[in-house]
């Protein structure tokens, strides 16, 4: 798991060319872009632009992915994403290969990651995360999730 600001994104270009493509796309992102999917490199790297209201953490679920890593970038608003390694999580379902996700019960402890505008978090397959959680009061979020095939 990595957390940083987009201003420092070049520091992560060593991860892989796919991460470079996703991070470079984010530097060109405009917050007025409509919600939906944009292909960056076909199914290898694509962006999911989202707008939503944050909710209390008890209304959200921990998740992880096996095929894709997430670069979760907050363009507007602030959200909290609790993090825990998947080794500390108990699945609540069988892995959904078609949608590439697995959901979990809340662990005994997790680390809250505060993402203000301009920040991003990278979650690899071993990183459980619970996006969309409230930071203080509910807020409108404009967010991009870059899916990077690993």
Image: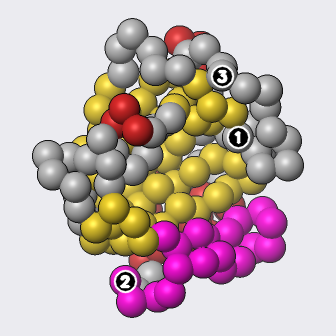
Which numbered disc flags the more N-terminal residue, 3 or 2? 2
Q: Nearer the viewer, mark 3 or mark 1?
A: 3
| Segment colored magenta | 31-50
Q: Which residue is drawn at 50% across and 87% down?
A: 34
> Label 3 belongs to which residue?
92
> Label 2 belongs to which residue?
31
In the figure, 38 relative to 115: above or below? below
Which numbered disc flags the more N-terminal residue, 2 or 1? 2
Q: Nearer the viewer, mark 3 or mark 2?
A: 3
* SS at badge 1: loop
Quarter-of-image position of residue 3: top left
Apparent side of residue 130 relative to residue 86 in the rendered image (left or right): left
Residue 136 pos. (x, y %): 14, 46
In the figure, 88 relative to 115: above or below? above
Which numbered disc flags the more N-terminal residue, 3 or 1? 3
Residues packed near mark 3 inside 10 Å, few (<14), some (14 to 19) or many (20 plus)? few
Q: Which residue is drawn at 57% across and 51% down?
A: 70
| Residue 50 circle label | none
């Amino acid at each position: 798991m990595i957390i940083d600001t987009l201003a420092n994104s070049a520091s992560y270009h060593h991860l892989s060319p796919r991460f470079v493509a996703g991070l470079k796309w984010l530097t060109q992102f405009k917050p007025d872009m409509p919600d939906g999917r944009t292909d960056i490199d076909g199914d290898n790297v694509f962006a999911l632009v989202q707008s939503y209201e944050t909710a209390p953490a008890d209304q959200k679920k921990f998740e992880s992915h096996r095929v894709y890593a997430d670069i979760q970038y907050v363009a507007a608003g602030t959200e909290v994403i609790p993090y825990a390694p998947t080794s500390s999580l108990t699945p609540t379902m069988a892995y959904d290969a078609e949608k590439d996700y697995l959901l979990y019960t809340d662990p005994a402890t997790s680390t809250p990651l505060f993402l203000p505008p301009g920040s991003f978090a990278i979650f690899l397959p071993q990183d459980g995360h619970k996006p969309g959680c409230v930071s203080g009061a509910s807020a409108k979020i404009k967010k991009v999730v870059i899916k990077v095939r690993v």
